[in-house]
Amino acid sequence: MMRQYELVERVQKYKPDANEALLNKAYVYAMQKHGQQKRASGDPYISHPLEVAAILTDMHLDESTIAVALLHDTIEDTTATRQEIDELFGEDIGRLVEGLTKLKKLDLVSKKAKQAENLRKLLLAISDDVRVLLVKLADRLHNMRTLEHMRDDKRARISEETMEIYAPLAGRMGMQDMRDELEDLSFRYINPEAYETVTKRLEELSRRNEGLITKIEDELRELLVANGLLGAGVKGRQKKPYSVFRKMQSKSLSFEQLSDVYGFRLLVDDVSSCYRALGIVHTRWRVVPGRFKDYISTPKQNDYRSLHTTIVGPSRQRIELQIRTRRMHEIAEFGIAAHALYKDGETPTSGEGELLPRESNAYSWLRHTIEALAEANNPEEFLEHTKLELFQDQVFCFTPKGKLIALPRGATPIDFAYAVHTNIGDTCVGAKINGRIMPLVTRLNNGDEVEIIRSGVQVPPAAWEEIVVTGKARAAIRRATRMAIRKQYSGLGYRILERTFERAGKPFSKELMKPVLHRLAHRDVEDAIAAVGRGEMSSLDVLRAVFPDYQDERVTVKPAMDQGWFNMRSASGMMFKLPEGRKKADTPAENGAGDSQTPDPLPIRGLADNIEVHFSPAGAVPGDRIVGIMEEGKGITIYPIQASALQKFDDEPERWIDVRWDLDEANKSRFYARVLVNAINEPGTLAKVAQLIAGLDINIRLLTMVRIAADFTEMAFDLEVWDLRQLNQLLSQLKELDCIATAKRVYD
């Protein structure tokens, strides 16, 4: 267990002016509060915060963060209070300790909705102060190192949580070494058989190649020195079990097929030396094609910078090389922790002529992720977004002006558009990739230049949600779809309410609805109006809420024959009229043949979108007398007047909407109808019927056949026809065939 003076010495090695009194006070306070408490391993409990503090000293963090590490369990597990810590150590440290106490209670692998909400809380807490994240990750790392002392079920739960959340989060924050260790420790408990197998194979390989890493290190070092890079450092390592297992799984390889189990890091003094070292190595040994990546000129989103290459090196062994400066190595090892000392608006240099960012890109990513809290409609959407962002590898693309956009692998131009700006994604209609117009489903590759083609009237199709891979794009598409649908239902609901209030002889305006929203159980007026449009709330309920003294005595306003009809944008050749207080029997759908359409047509999507206007299951064709029914959650359903399904709406006249056909000559739409045929069961019958149907230019969408007797078969044809005249012509000619007993149209 680390002693008090040892802790102070560790901090003073990298920060000579550290506040020694603060460290001593925090050490003594934590020791007193934890007293005789024991861990599951039997060790004194104080050993845990001391080890967490030791991990953070390895990252060269300031004394305030080390003090928080020492105190992070005191509020939860001892008699310490926030007020007491504020008085002794200051409000800043007290706030961080309390924040960590709340995070300890979060279960990140419970049911999906709860898991998502807890992940929100975690990210919100660590977005306030990076030190919360650093202490939390160090706390988790030490817990994973001592996990063997826990119960099996608890080991599995903690390991799963670490693999799903904390390890990817450490990677996103640029702390790659911590991520590797967390993944490896989790792998040990999540899949113990695979862990044991891979570990044994690596041990065998290590014994077989004993001294190989040292030999390659020496040869690389000698080569660099001989070419003038005197201060270059070389460090080799064998890959960890989980890294090996993941590669075997992702590329479907056996252990024997793995060729790059060894990796080496070359550390040099400055950026130019990185490229000199690369040239020296490539000149000496053969390069494996397609395995070179330059993350110096194009850094990863978590600030990682390095040159990656794979060579067939000394002893004809395939090895991976990472070439970077020492400052780059520090950031690669410790990620955002490497920036943690530089606060209070300072912008120091690294000593290599490189400026350190005032806020790391990794932490900036975290803040952008928090913005998704406002965009996600529910916790599950946020969880999906965040996990997508945590786990996927990246490709780097450019705007025409040279701005770098990092995206997950498999991203499309739609993802690119939303990454630039939500408004650009919403109005995207096409894309040029490297100067060529390409489909929006094209997968982007590293280095692509993407130009987005926009339209001011575009609304993102809901189908895009299945194409995109980024959480931001999915959330934006869902939000735009919800808003478009709400706007459409709201327009229809407004028109219905106008008619209802007019029949009752009452004025209508949105202002009248505001005071009674609590009675209607909606947050705002638009929501309430949209609910009327969706059929979820009756227009009469709104009328009674606004005018509580209203008695249901309808005032019939007799309209002129040329009033009341309106169209719906793109509603495939139909005109609509809302109920005027009459039963359906009094309002035949085809009257008003010469009616004019009212101004301001409702912004309702057409039939092709299957959102607001639908046909009944048996369809309807031009020439039919038709009627529209408002159905909850569906909008308007069009029925032929002969449909028996209309009977169930007899007592709800407010749901009936008059509809008439309004097709122009240029309309090329076919309409759905169902025909039932009883045919003699003999060879050639189906061929004769199909030939007749095709000869009349009618399309068969679906055919089902049922044997109803020894000599008869019932055929149900789902057809697409131009109009009622064509359908009647078909029925007439079917009845003339010798092989047909009966032929009729089905309305339900």
Image (cartoon, rainbow, N blue to C red):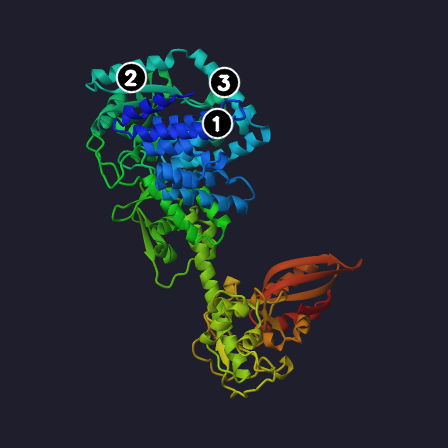
Which callout, 2 or 3, points at the residue further toward the start of the chain?
3
Foreground disc of the pair 3, 1:
1
**How would you rate the neighbour count of disc 3 (Cα within 10 Å): few for under 14, some for 14-19, many for 20 or more?**
some
Residue 326, located in which quarter of the rendered image?
top left
Observer-nearest residue: 335 or 707?
335
Q: Which mark is residue 220?
A: 2
> Measured along the vertical axis of the image, is residue 553 above or below residue 665?
below
Which callout, 3 or 1, points at the residue further toward the start of the chain?
1
Residue type at mark 1 is Gly
> Measured along the vertical axis of the image, is residue 222 above or below residue 595?
above
Circle 2 SS class:
helix
Q: Is residue 94 visible?
A: yes
Task: State the residue position of label 1.
Answer: 35
Residue under the point 27% across and 46% down: 403
Q: Which quarter of the rendering shows the N terminus?
A: top left
Which callout, 2 or 1, points at the residue further toward the start of the chain?
1
Distance Cα–Cα, label 3 vs label 1: 44 Å
Residue type at mark 3 is Arg
Q: Can you name the residue that lies furthest to the right here?
A: 710
